[in-house]
Image (cartoon, rainbow, N blue to C red):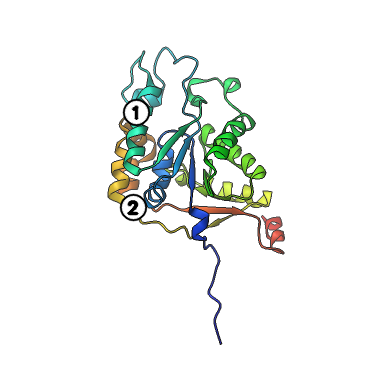
């Protein structure tokens, strides 16, 4: 008797023909999805908060100061150059939205998910990817907005294949990844670890991360970057799709 092979989590190759990775900041896609970008060259990385603020604060923020910036420095210009270097190394191409990092704005000035979704949706229509990888959207306000905006776009374009990747560093904060999974389950959009074929290359991942020179010190300070890289923490991708018919009631027990 023929045995039917298991299919849970498998991804069809044609679904990965054209990939777009949504990155809250310049380094997030590289921190969380380098193996994906290396395995599928010519992918697009859409940096959501890649624009200039109306004005920099008189003194650098804590994050910028840890990265070596001083008053009067054009932080975004430097980070764009670093990102160009990383994208060239990964054979990916950068798309930048013009929203400013939340650290430069008071809460009422920050872009809401609906506003970001309009710009993100336009970028994705132009790119026409077969698969989109969103951040899980953990802890950092910009990560949360990028995730929520991506889900709004997904509601309008369910024909694409949608995934989440785990936000580097933030996924290790106690309970946060589980919190996001639980919230997604309640929406009827079940996150399931996917079998996305990649070729891990930690040496090239370290090389790509090292392009973000102004980010390394704050990443060490706040996210134990060296320890995470030394541990070879794997990348994980979660498929976003409705549950199998009849399984919906599992979410009711959460």
| Residue closer to the observer: 193 or 52 | 52
Q: Between 83 and 66, which is closer to the camera in this rendering?
A: 83
- Residue at point 48%, 43% (across, down): 21
Numbered marks: total: 2
Give the residue furthest to the bottom.
1
Check the picture and name the quadrant holding the C terminus: bottom right
Q: Does the residue at mark 1 contact the one at mark 2 (Cβ under 8 Å)?
A: no
> Is 79 left, or right, of 98 in this rendering?
left
Q: Measured along the vertical axis of the image, is residue 249 above or below residue 98?
A: below
Q: CA distance from mark 1 to mark 2?
A: 27 Å
Identity of the residue drawn at 39% across and 48% down: 41
Residue 232's label in the rendered image is 2
User: Helix, strand or loop at disc 2?
Assistant: loop
Q: Position of residue 181 (x, y in %)?
A: 58, 50
Within 10 Å of disc 2 (Cα), the crowding (few <14, some 14-19, many 20+) is: few
Question: Counting residues from the N terminus, which is met first, the one under dot 1 or under dot 2?
Answer: 1
Question: Looking at this view, is 104 or 122 the one in front?
Answer: 122
Does dot 1 land on a helix, a strand or a loop? helix
Residue at x 33% of width, y 21% of height: 69
Please tell me in which quadrant of the rendered image residue 7 appears.
Answer: bottom right
Give the percent coordinates (x, y) of residue 42: 41, 45
Q: Residue at x 61, y 21 (%)?
A: 108
- Residue 92 position, x and y percent, is 39, 41
Q: Position of residue 44 (x, y in %)?
A: 45, 41
Q: Which residue is mark 1?
A: 81
């Amino acid at each position: 008797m023929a045995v039917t092979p298991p299919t849970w989590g498998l991804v069809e190759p044609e679904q990965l023909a054209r990939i777009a990775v949504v990155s809250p900041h310049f380094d997030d896609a590289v921190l969380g999805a380098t193996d994906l970008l290396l395995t599928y060259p010519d992918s697009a990385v859409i940096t959501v908060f890649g624009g200039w603020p109306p004005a920099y604060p008189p003194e650098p923020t804590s994050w910028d100061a840890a990265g070596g910036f001083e008053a009067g420095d054009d932080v975004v210009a430097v980070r764009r150059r670093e990102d160009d270097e990383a994208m060239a190394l990964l054979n990916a191409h950068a798309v930048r939205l013009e929203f400013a990092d939340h650290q430069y704005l008071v809460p009422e000035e920050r872009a809401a998910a609906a506003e970001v979704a309009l710009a993100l949706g336009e970028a994705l229509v132009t790119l026409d990817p077969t698969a989109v990888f969103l951040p899980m959207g953990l802890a950092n306000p910009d990560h949360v907005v990028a995730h929520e905006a991506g889900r709004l776009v997904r509601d309008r374009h369910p024909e694409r294949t949608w995934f989440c990747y785990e936000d580097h560093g933030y996924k290790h904060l106690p309970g946060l990844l589980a919190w996001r999974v639980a919230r997604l389950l309640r929406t009827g959009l079940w996150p399931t670890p996917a079998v996305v074929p990649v070729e891990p290359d930690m040496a090239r991942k370290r090389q790509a991360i090292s392009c973000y020179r102004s980010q390394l010190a704050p990443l060490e300070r706040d996210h134990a970057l060296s320890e995470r890289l030394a541990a070879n923490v794997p990348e994980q991708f979660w498929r976003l799709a409705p549950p199998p018919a009849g399984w919906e009631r599992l979410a009711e027990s959460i």
